[in-house]
Image (spheres, rainbow, N blue to C red):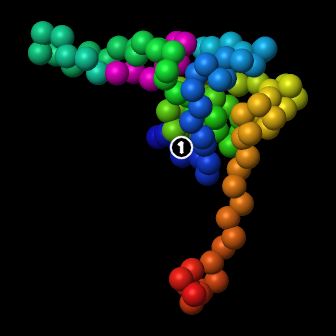
Amino acid sequence: MAKMGSYCKAYPIKRLRQFSGWSENLQNLRKEIKEVNGEAIPTTRELREDDFFYLQENLVVTDGVFIDENVIFSSAALAWEEFCKRELNFEIPVYEPLKPGSSEEN
């Protein structure tokens, strides 16, 4: 079963491709269902320049919102982490927990 992470952010593919160490595992692209002669056939989707990939909280790039499916790019390199922070301004937001009985409208 697919796992949803705590946070991910969509980026245009062209922005991600600006990383010098970028490579794409295109065999992991999401499947689309196309109807051929009345039969539903899963096919690999075709990428367009204006499509988006998702940068997950663990800095893995996926073709969809699930953290463990359709992994397109993964790197443990410090250069990738720096690129995400500096060039993409990727930052996981910190949400303050609400106290029981409190209201944001006050």
Residue for point 35% across, 14% down = 43
| The one of 102 and 14 positioned closer to us in this rendering | 14
**Badge 1, how many Cα within 10 Å: few under 14, some, many 20+?**
few
Against 104, residue 20 (above or below) is above
| The one of 106 and 81 positioned closer to us in this rendering | 106
* Residue 81 makes an appearance in the image: no
State the image quarter where residue 53 is shown. top right
Against 35, residue 55 (above or below) is below
State the image quarter where residue 95 is shown. bottom right
| The one of 11 and 7 positioned closer to us in this rendering | 11
73 to the left or right of 3: right
Mark 1 secondary-structure assignment: loop
Residue for point 57% across, 87% down = 106
| Rendered location of residue 51, percent (x, y) | 49, 23
State the image quarter where residue 23 is shown. top right
89 to the left or right of 49: right
Residue lying at the far left in this picture: please name it.
Answer: 38
What residue span does the magenta drawing correspond to? 26-32
Residue for point 72% across, 41% down = 90
Residue for point 63% across, 29% down = 61
Q: Is residue 29 magenta?
A: yes
25 to the left or right of 75: left
Q: Amino acid at mark 1?
A: Lys
Q: Which residue is mark 1?
A: 3
Residue lying at the far top in this picture: please name it.
Answer: 37
| Rendered location of residue 77, percent (x, y) | 85, 25
| Rendered location of residue 49, percent (x, y) | 51, 15
Q: Is residue 59 magenta?
A: no
